[in-house]
Structure formats: structure tokens, C-alpha cells
Amino acid sequence: MRILVVEDERRIADFLERGLQGAGYAVDVAPDGNTALTFVGATDYDLIILDIMLPDIDGLKVLERIRARKAGPPVLILSARGAVDDRVKGLEQGADDYLTKPFAFVELLARVRALLRRGQPAPEKLQVMDLTLDIMRRKVTRGTESIDLAPKEFGILEYMMRNKGRPLSRTMIVEHVWDMDYDGLTNIVDVYIRHLRSKIDDRYTAKLIQTVRGIGYMIEGPESPAVAKPAEQAFEPQV
């Protein structure tokens, strides 16, 4: 999932960017309102964290313009203005939540997850054959086995499972999961796909991550699904 942080104070912006990336989200940072509106016009975000006091446009004006374009993603206002009137005004103008500075990151993360859950019509669990991904608990299992994934591995797998059966290019995967543009040279996607395959496919007879020649990758069950068992369990010695 991709989050836009609109914050002009570099120290806070860096703190939010590192923390959210550590939680597995892709993050863009806009230092002012005009940049934020440009980003929103070019990218579909799952959530926007918006400061009110920006150097060029008041944050509430930015919120107004976002809401005028389309329903848009959930917006969490993060501001030093903590008076009741300020909070009420922000919520009345279309914000979904309001958190005052200073704040505890664990509380911000809990609110982010709550807003994403509210704004996502998709189920909390995704499944491809016997592979299950629990979005809220951030747990992955195949059959009865629990699989530990790094944050970026989890992000790639979630993106692929949300698009089950749809070929995804390396560009699409990088731009959705990483805070960067695909430069046509990096093999970072291939590296992470190898890591994922080693964890969710290599020990199983049914392979779920498919290579789509000339495009990229997709996830789906085999055409003739068999009971997916770990390879060592499927082996029966001759006697």
C-alpha cells in the first residue's frame, strides 16, 4: 500500500517515512501543498497524512482540493493545532482522522491501519489455493505452516495476491512497493521474487508464483490444482 506524507518539517517527514517503510508501506513525501496536489493527481494513494501548516497553501485548502477532485483516499491530519475547534474544522472539511503533535508513532500506526482497513473493501485475508495472507495481523501461512516474510516481501506478496491471475510488470511492482521509480536496470524485483519462491514455493509441489515471459510475474494456482504438500511429504520411498 502507498502512503503520501505531506509535511514541511524535514525531521518529522524523515521520521514518518522511515517508520512507515519499516511497517511495510511505500511512502512518498511532499514538502508543500502544491507538490502534494501534483502527487495526488499522478498517483493513486491508499492514505494521505497531511500537515495543516504548510509553507505555500494551508493544509485545509489542500484537503478541500483533494476532496473536490474525487472521493479520494482516507486523510489523516497531523498537526500542532490541537484545539477542539481546529479538530472539528478539519473533520468537517473531509478529514477522516485528526492527530495532534507531538504524537507516539505506535498510535499513528494504529490509526493508519484503522483507516486503511476502513477504506479497503477487500477482505482482511487473501488466499491463493492453500496460501493465506492475513493483512491486519501481517501473517502468512501455507497449509498449516507459518511463513516469516520481511516487510518488502510481504508487500510484494500482498500486491500479487490482490491481483491474482493478473501479470504484473517489474515496473508496477517497484512503483507500488518501493518509494522509487523503476530505472529499467535494477534486478531488485527478481531478487525478492527468488526470496519469496524459496519461502512459499520451493518446498511445495504446487508452484504459485509464475514467470510471465516478457512482462514480469503473477500469482495463481496451477491449471490442474493438486493438493499442495511440502515436497518432502509428497515423496514416498519405494519398498
Image (cartoon, helix red, strand yellow):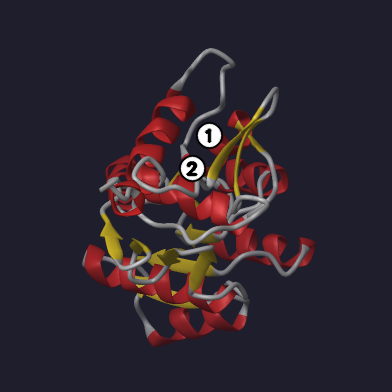
Q: Secondary structure at mark 1?
A: helix
Q: Quick check: 20 above or below 124?
A: above
Residue at horizontal 55 percent and vertical 75 percent from the top: 123
**Looking at this view, is 129 or 37 the one in front?**
129
How far across and down, in percent of the image, does residue 41 sit?
Answer: 72, 47
Residue 164 visible? The answer is yes
Q: Give how far across and how far down residue 199 sits, in percent.
A: 33, 44
Residue 231 in the image: state x and y as whole percent: 34, 47
Q: Residue 174 got which mark?
A: 1
Please state which of residues 19 and 55 is positioned toward the viewer in this rendering.
19
What is the number of the mark on residue 232?
none
Q: Extreme front residue here?
A: 239
Q: Amino acid at mark 1?
A: Val
Which residue is labeled 2 in the image?
A: 177
**x, y percent for residue 2:** 52, 51
- Going by the image, does 76 lie left or right of 71? left
Of 9 and 160, which appears nearest the observer? 160
Marks 2 and 1 close (CB-CB < 8 Å): yes
Q: Residue furthest right?
A: 69
Could you tell me which secondary element the residue under label 2 belongs to?
Answer: helix
User: How many angstroms separate mark 2 from mark 1 (CA)?
Assistant: 5 Å
Residue drawn at x 30%, y 54% is 233
